[in-house]
Structure formats: structure tokens, C-alpha cells
Amino acid sequence: MPEAAAELIKQEEKTEISIRPKIEYLKEIVAHAEANVPFYNKIYKNVNTDIQSLDDFAQLPRVTNTIYGREHISTVVTNVEDMFETRGPIRAYFPETKTIRIVSIEEARTEYDVIYDTLELENRDLSKEKIMVAGDVHSLIGLNEMIFCFSGFDTPLLTMSIADHSDQEIRKIMNRFQPTMFFNATNRAFPNEVYPGSVNDVYHFNRQELLKEAPSGIMYHDLYTHPLFGLVAMRNADEDCHLYCSWFFHIEENENQQLILTSTYDETQPKIRFQTADRGTVTGKNQQLRNTHLP
């Protein structure tokens, strides 16, 4: 971990967001899920949910995609009858796992706060950047939340939806805006000549294979996302691990190094100790995720 990031973590331990031990966030989401979500009420029926430590938390049942996928959506969300009254606008995603992901607008925006907070772990000051975000028809909804996240800062921001734009057309737009950071939320990998000299950082989603292909002078980053959790962690080409925010997620690994994810902020559709197919090793103070087979 860079020294600047390590020092920032130490500083954050003194701030309001890190004063509460992680176990407090986990206790709250477990209590909420058991009381309000039929699925968790069922699987916790004969389980001690009075967790006092991370070791206690690790004794809670794991949830796999097979188990979760058998459930009707009404059994895995909070108070489906009055959801719209208590949660406000709701957004539904239909990932390739065929398991619907439902979040409130507030939770959807929190997902993209993960980007900002993780950038802080890397000691990045967004107020000094010019940010460009590009998406396609498959990422338009997510772009709205990402825009909302970045628009809260005094940062020049350009967003565009890429359809059949040629590389030359995209380069022209970049040359006009001169971004310093480019978030590529499409499935395209642009050739190096597309990026003007102003670009210092390029962020891809689940494209680790591109980390070694960055042109001279540009740092490539990989944003690890999961269909049911959204954005989880971030890695740059100089590191051999992903950084993540432990106040948003608790990450464990099983005996086969499969990652077990828990979100502390998803109350509309809680996901607690969800065993993924992604593999990795958790290191440090639960702030680093040393990957082996992340997507």
C-alpha cells in the first residue's frame, strides 16, 4: 500500500466515519435483515445473531447464489408492502446472474461514493481534477449515480454516452475537454492514441487484463464490481491488490479463497455473508483485497 494511503487510513481512524468499530455496522445490518427481510428471518431462526465480534459474525450462515436465486424477490427485500413509502424511489437491476438487485436511490448514490472514498484512500484530491465519464446503453442508469457523486465537488465534469462513435470522434471530444481522469464504463478498450496528453488516469470496470497495457504517462485502474453489490474495490497498475472501504463492506474469504461479501449500506435488499465465485485474499486491516482471480 502506498505510504500516503496508509497515512490516510490512520487519519481516518480519528474521523467520525471511522470512530465506530466495524462490528457496530455489521450488528445493525444483521438486526435489520432479521427483523425486516423474510429470507434472513428464516435462515437466522436457529442461529445466534447477538454478534459481539467479527468471529461471531463469521459463524452466521453463508449465502450462495444458488440459495439466493431460489427466493422470490419479495422475500429478500425489506417490507415489500410499503417499500415505496419508506424507501422512496426504487431502482431495479437485472444482472446476468438472473438475480434481481433492488436499491433505493440513496443506496444507488452511496455505491458511487465508494469511488470517491476509495480515491481518498489513494490520497487523490478530486477538486484538482477534470473528470470525463463515458458509458453505453448498458450503463446509462449507473452513469446518473456516478454523475451525482462527482457533481458534489467543485470539479469540471463531462459525461457522454457512446453508441457508434468512432475512436476519432471520441478523441476530438477529449481534446476539447482535456480531462485528467477518464472513467470508461463501456466494454470498449480505446487505443492509446485516443487519450490526449492531459489524461493521467483511466478507470475500467472489471478489466484487470488492461492494467499492463497503459501507455506511458497514464495510470490504468481497475474497479472491481459484483452484480449484486455494485462497486466494491479499486486497484491501480502499480499495486498487486485492490483497496476497498471497510465502512461500506466487510470482506472475508472461505477455505477456497472465494470472497464472502457483506454490504453495510444496502438496507433495501440486504446481502450478508454472500459467497461469490470471485477469488482473493483479504490482507491488512481489512482495507486491502489482494486478488488472485477477481473478474
Image (cartoon, helix red, strand yellow):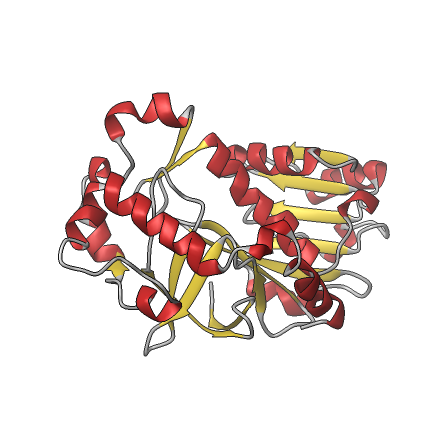
Is any atom of residue 127 visible in this view? yes
Please name whichever residue, 31 or 213, is drawn nearer the observer in this view of the structure.
31
**What residue is rendered at 43% in x and 60% in y?**
23
Left or right: 294, with 182 as reference point:
left
Left or right: 110, with 1 as reference point:
left
Is any atom of residue 98 visible in this view? no
Left or right: 269, with 21 as reference point:
left
Q: Is residue 294 above or below residue 202?
A: below
Please name whichever residue, 133 or 288, is drawn nearer the observer in this view of the structure.
288
Please name whichever residue, 169 or 279, is drawn nearer the observer in this view of the structure.
279
Residue 133 picture location, percent across and down: 67, 40
Q: To which quarter of the image does residue 98 belong?
A: top left
Residue 213 picture location, percent across and down: 68, 66
**What residue is rendered at 23% in x and 62% in y?**
61
Q: Is residue 81 above or below residue 14?
A: above
**What residue is rendered at 31% in x and 40% in y?**
100
Q: Is residue 163 above or below residue 271?
A: above
